Image (tube, helix red, strand yellow):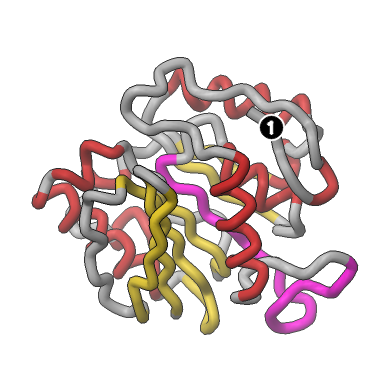
Amino acid sequence: MRIIGGTHRRRPILGPLDEKTTRPITDRVKEAAFSRLIQARALPFADEPPPGEPGVPLIALDVFCGTGSLGLEALSRGADHCVFVDRDRTARRLLEKNLDDLDLADRATVLGVDVLAFEPPDLWVRSLPETPVRLVMLDPPYALLRDEQATSKIAALGAALADACVHGAVLMLRGETEAEAPAIEGWEGPDSRAYGAMSLHWYYR
């Protein structure tokens, strides 16, 4: 695995030890995803000031982050800070190694939280250390979006995150093409596109 754009372009990163639950995103799909995020002004164009109000940091949130492929890409492409969230301790150790290797630890917060265990979900959202958020990336294990109850919890989490986001924020959800993306309260969408067996779903605040 590697970063494909921005200041850390071509730098290798550690991937997950177990690729059965969530397959690593391919370079082709990652490039398509981040091109879309830049066009939606969730991240800056190259050599341009960041989107949003001057002086307001661009905060990204990478939930179900694994070893951090999406959040690290966002940092490389101009996010000021990224909050990485995953309940798996092994994945977080690999993520922290990636942050150290890329000298990005001072621009990251790593949380060991099971975000779907909170009822209501805004109990967790209110404790976020960095807000307001401009970019939310949700990359749950594929099995969760095959389960109706888990999908409802992911939609409730997205709805709770809306209040922590700036106007114009973008939420990106990744899942299997055969799994239908839910509507998420507080967001317009989904606007979906399939890439073989994988789909990306965009929502707009």
* Residue 45 against residue 187 in the figure, above or below: above
| In this rendering, position of residue 199 left or right of residue 184 | right
**Horizontal side, residue 50 vs residue 59: left or right:** right
Read off the residue under disc 1.
2
Q: Is residue 111 left or right of residue 78?
A: left
For this rendering, which residue is in front, 63 or 108? 63
> Who's the residue at 20% across and 59% down the image?
120
The residue carrying pointer 1 sits among few (fewer than 14), some (14 to 19) or many (20 or more) residues within 10 Å by Cα, namely: some
- Which quadrant of the rendered structure holds the N terminus? top right
Residue 89: x and y, percent? 43, 22
In the displayed structure, does residue 30 sit left or right of residue 115?
A: right
Q: Which amino acid, by three-letter code, is at mark 1?
A: Arg
Q: Give how far across and how far down residue 33 sits, in percent.
A: 56, 57
Residue plotted at (56% across, 37% down): 68
Give the quarter of the figure containing the C terminus: bottom left
* 96 and 188: which is toward the camera: 188
Q: How many marks?
A: 1
Magenta region includes residue 187: no
**Location of residue 197 with respect to 185 vertically, above or below:** above
Q: Read off the magenta span.
A: 47-64
Q: What secondary structure characterizes most of the magenta part?
A: loop
Residue 69's spot in the image, x, y percent? 58, 38
**Residue 59 in magenta?**
yes
Task: Give the vertical position of 74 relative to 14 (above or below).
Answer: below
* Residue 21 figure quarter: top left
Percent position of residue 90, x then y: 46, 18
Residue at 71% across / 50% down in the picture? 75
Seen at 57% across and 45% down, the residue is: 70
